[in-house]
Amino acid sequence: MRGRVLVSVAGVALAFTAAARPSIAQPRVIRGLVSDHRNRPIASAAVIAVGVGVTGGTVTDDSGRFQIEIPHQNRVTFDVRRVGFMPSRVGLEAGGDTSVAVLLLPATTVLPGVSVIQTELRPPALAGFEQRMRERTRGAGTGRFITADEIAKMSPNRTTQVLENENSLSVRRVGADRYAVFGRASGGVSCPATLYLDGVRLLAGGQQIRDRRGRVVGREAGAPIDEFVTPQEIAGIEIYPRALLAPAQFQPPADNDLATRCAIVVVWTKHG
């Protein structure tokens, strides 16, 4: 009888200890391959995580592969984009580490003689852009706004060309065919601007940098916005010379001191 009582008490104590131990959320690693309809890998494709508790993303390497760590194991959604291809959205159910394959189809060619007179399909996010632009016109807001009509008049070949003449920004070549956007922090120090695409912050870094032995030693500076969106896809751009002038939803991480003192550029696409 005593033995049974002791076992019972020990079981209760063990259960109590387990219940009192705080649960630790395990991160989730997503690995993937992005390819076209001919099974050719697509390099420099943007993989952007969207949803509650998830921000940022990454780009595919030269073999079309990517890896991203999610801070939880709940359902997560990815937007995958690359210039010349139709964007794709991939949803993953809750779970552990996962490997995925993503197919991107070539962008549809516009047939001659076809024109769109009017459309009611407008991304909901553009309402916020237009409201902030109206507030700026009335002198109640901050920032510089560039519309799709203004961009069309510039006839740019790449998105960074739209920003080349902005006083608060500078555009520099950082790779063979790659340009990055920079702002100016206090004291005139050059700093990589924080870029958002449809409200999602883009992580810095584009093509991989390799040493003489072929080992990856880093990525090129700046977020590769030209690889994510073409000028023809842009519905509007917001520019804030300093992060403190930008709306709260576009603030960079507080622990990145240089980014908090640098420029913010928010790009909105027509398809959202």
Image: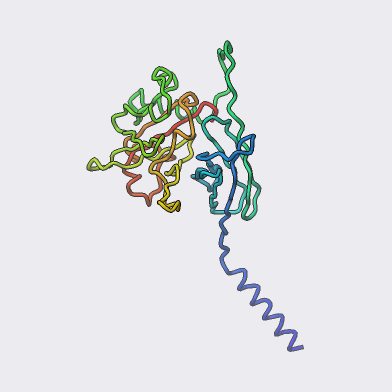
| Residue at figure coordinates x 62%, y 68% from the top left | 19
As drawn, the residue found furthest toward the right would be: 1
Q: Nearer the viewer, residue 172 or 5?
A: 172
Picture quadrant where residue 175 is located: top left
| Residue at figure coordinates x 40%, y 51% from the top left | 211
Q: How is the image coloured?
A: rainbow
Q: Please provide percent x and percent y for residue 88.
A: 60, 35
Picture quadrant where residue 84 is located: top right
Q: Is residue 8 above or below residue 121?
A: below
| Residue at figure coordinates x 60%, y 53% from the top left | 73
| Residue at figure coordinates x 50%, y 45% from the top left | 58
As drawn, the residue found furthest toward the top would be: 113
Q: Please provide percent x and percent y for residue 47.
A: 54, 42
173 sits to left or right of 7:
left
Q: Is residue 161 above or below residue 98?
A: above
86 sits to left or right of 223:
right
Picture quadrant where residue 37 is located: top right
Q: Please provide percent x and percent y for residue 42.
A: 55, 39
Q: Please provide percent x and percent y for residue 196.
A: 44, 37
For the N terminus, the quadrant is bottom right
Q: Is residue 23 above or below residue 67?
A: below
Q: Nearer the viewer, residue 182 or 176?
A: 176
Q: Nearer the viewer, residue 56 or 120?
A: 56
